[in-house]
Amino acid sequence: MTDRVLPRRNESVFLRNENLIYPVLAFLLIFFVCPIVWFFIKSALDYDGSFALKLYQTFTSPLFIAVTWKTVWISLLVTILALLAAYPIAYSLTRAGPLSFTLIIICVIVPYFTSIIVRTYSWMIILGTHGVINRLLISVGIIDKPITLIYNMVGVVIGMTYVLLPYFVLTLYSAMKSIDPWLIQAGRSMGASNSYVFRKVFLPLSVPGIISGFLIVYILAIGFFITPALMGGPNNVMMAMLIQRNIEITMDWALASALSLFLLFITLIIYAFYCKYTDLDKMLGQ
Amino acid sequence: MNKRIKFVNILSAILCLILIAPILIVVIVSFGKSSYMIFPPSSFSTKWYLDFFSSPDWMGSLVTSLIIGLVSSLIATTLGFLGAYSLVRGTYRNKKLLISFCLLPLIIPSIITAVALYFASVPLDLVGSKLWIAICHAALSIPVVLLILISSLQGVDQSIERAAYGLGASKFYTFTRIVIPLAAPGILSAAFFSFLTSFDELIISLFLSGVSSQTLPVRIWNSLLMDMEPVIAAISSFLILLTIVLLLLELAARRLRT
């Protein structure tokens, strides 16, 4: 009895752990990958051979270049602003006591899980002509008539930064949490000041978190649709909106697919970097 | 030296206030009486809530959203659980690549997924089908389910499974009687969050809903583009409340686990 090894029975091959992944892979393949691949193949076929030309025409059109440029830099601005706001929050989370930790995490998690359209709507109320900000500024006497904070660039940037901020906070926090507190302690005990320890120990150690947060938020920003569509003006069209307009309004499937292909391409490149820099294996405890 | 810490604390307190303020403002505004959304409201009433709950259109959309959310959560949680178990317990040569692939629905901009699905749905006559929207939402929720269940299954002691297996239980029996009960709180949170993912999803629903299956977010979207009906504030508050209730239930489920 004592030298008995674990029994090996003839279990069905379907019950091997590795095979349990197939249903989910098959599902994603059928309902996610196939439609996307089919969409691009079909649009290429429909223009039998001239799809390349269509792509070329699209990618050199002034509208495309303007929209791409706008998307790239609005997203960059939003990502930088989100980083600047997320860093102090995440940093406070790592050093907070139980009560302030709970309070901060509530302020991050509740917006994070609230639907994007609701969050956008609330900023439309706040920034509108008769919104909180305008009324406050008027009552204080800084301005005497309402300023336009919505349906322009300001609205888009504020709205997007707000929506994306919780993603950045959570990514940064999970990276900062894994920084060994003893390293900070060691620096402190050797006589370094708080700010010195922060600059020379904590900040450099949090760089991987900054990079993965930056990449993930940037990916989300360039594909963003709801907030810029509701809060932007006619001059703030971003890539995702242009795709939607080409389907719903002009029915230009070829242009929509060319734009989608381009957006997909950028997204996958940034995602490849993200996967390279982020420890996905650590997530699996390896 | 301590001044800097105090500065950081004050700064993050302000930032947290900015994070939570819009949520609170919507809730307060929803109780306002005038049809202009003004904060703070001059007088209060609950008439927008009555409008919401007595409107057959809005209630129809709510039911549609609930049905789609439940079905898609069921699909995503079932498939995602098997996948997460496989990823945690199985041995793969290229696990990282596999996970990167499974997270794609979260990464690829929804607009691309939505347009591609719409493109496929038109010839197949699937636009407006609730089941079809639920299936498409499930694909979107699978990454969420996987992320939650991978971390939750790592906390389940593998030796218990080995013991059951060693004592003669079949693999299937071990799976249904040991693994699933032990992972139950994680499964529950995965189900909640995949429900929420589908319930809040707008872009795919926007393309696939047609006239017959308008979900709540789609109806809100149409209203915001047209005339911003004041009832939206009440609906938004209702959605916020629902989110908070789900978060609290999830927290309770997690307490159960420990």
Image: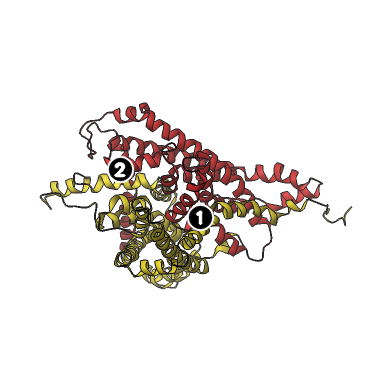
- Outermost residue toward the front in this view: A48
Horizontal and vertical percent for residue B206? 41, 45
Across the whole image, how many numbered discs are drawn on residues? 2
- Horizontally, is A120 left or right of B89 in the view? left
| Quarter of the view holding residue B176 | top right
Chain containing mark 2: B
Residue with the mark numbered 2: B224
Question: Which labelled disc corresponds to residue B219?
Answer: none
Chain ID for red? B
> Mark 2 is on which residue type?
Leu
Chain containing mark 1: B
Q: Residues within 10 Å of mark 1 (few under 14, many from 20)?
A: many
Q: Is residue B172 visible?
A: yes
Q: Residue at x 31, y 40 (%)?
A: B223
Give the alpha-carbon distance from disc 2 to disc 1, as whole Å: 27 Å
- Horizontally, is B211 left or right of A232 in the view? right
* Mark 2 element type: helix
- Outermost residue toward the right in this view: A1
| A67 relative to B202, above or below | below
Q: Are marks 2 and 1 in contact (CB under 8 Å)?
A: no
In the figure, the shade used to draw chain A is yellow
Question: Which labelled disc corresponds to residue B105?
Answer: 1
Horizontal and vertical percent for residue B135? 54, 45
Q: Nearest the camera: B65 or A174?
A: B65
| B74 relative to B113, above or below | above
> Mark 1 is on which residue type?
Pro
Q: Residue at x 33, y 42 (%)?
A: B222
Q: Nearest the camera: B227 or A197?
A: B227
Horizontal and vertical percent for residue A204? 43, 71
Horizontal and vertical percent for residue A50? 44, 67
Q: Is residue B13 visible?
A: no
